Amino acid sequence: MSQINSYIVLYDKLNVRYIYNTSGRAIVWRNVFLFFVLNIFYLYSIYHSLVNKCWITWIFAFWYGMAGGLGVTAGAHRLWSHRSYKARLPFRIVLMIFHTIAGQNDLHEWCRDHRVHHKYAETDADPHNSRRGFFFAHVGWLLTRKHPDVIAKGKQLDCSDILNDPVVKFQKKY
Ligand SMILES: [Zn+2]
């Protein structure tokens, strides 16, 4: 282990280097606050809908969650990031709306992060590098600043196919 400014450099059993920022500036407090508030609302909504027997809310929440999930999995992941299939304009618009309600950044940012994740998996350039621990890989990466390698490698990736889609452009603009 060694210290470079505010970064700690570690080597795992396979001698793969990984780094994490130990400075307070690494934490994005705005995101910490938003996640905290979001989870408080979530817990309160469960309590409120159970106590007041708002079953229609449960049905709405189920389908809302399904739509958001589809926007991320079928849209951002399979269609735009991996180009696993082709979709016509109306379906892409539906997927973009579904992706928007999931609240996971815009499509361009999502796909760039995902492509850089696959290309540099489990290195510092991986936005949710699992070598930095379970919490970081699942939630922590959304609460901290990106590692400089993520930004540098992300800029080198060709994401022109994503940005050339007018549906993605529209979502990014609005
Ligand atoms: Zn993938």
Image (tube, rainbow, N blue to C red):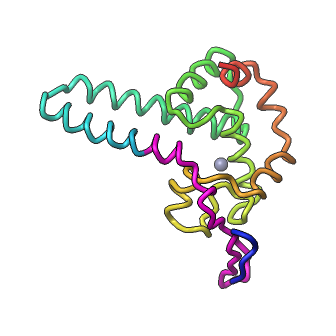
Q: Residue furthest top?
A: 90
| Image quadrant where residue 172 sits | top right
Which quadrant of the view contains residue 43? top left
Part of the protein shown in magenta: 7-35
Judge whether 17 appears above or below 150 on screen: below
Q: Total number of numbered labels?
A: 0
Residue 133, percent across and down? 55, 68
* Residue 152 screen position, x and y as percent: 82, 52
Relative to 164, is 28 on the left or the right?
left
Residue depicted at 49% across the width and 36% down the height = 69
Of 142 and 122, nearer the camera is 142
* Left or right: 142 in relation to 19: left
| Depicted 78 relative to depicted 163: above or below | below
Depicted 172 relative to depicted 27: above or below? above
What is the quadrant of the C terminus in the image?
top right
Give me the residue at 70% from left, 58% from top.
Answer: 126
- Height in image: 154 above or below 38? below
Magenta span contains residue 97: no
User: Residue 154 location, x and y as percent?
Assistant: 79, 48
Please indicate whether residue 116 sits to the left or right of residue 25 in the image. Answer: right
Residue 29 forms part of the magenta stretch:
yes
Quadrant where the N terminus is found in the figure = bottom right
Q: Is residue 95 left or right of residue 79?
A: left
Q: Position of residue 34 (x, y in %)?
A: 46, 40
Residue at 49 percent of width and 48 percent of height: 32
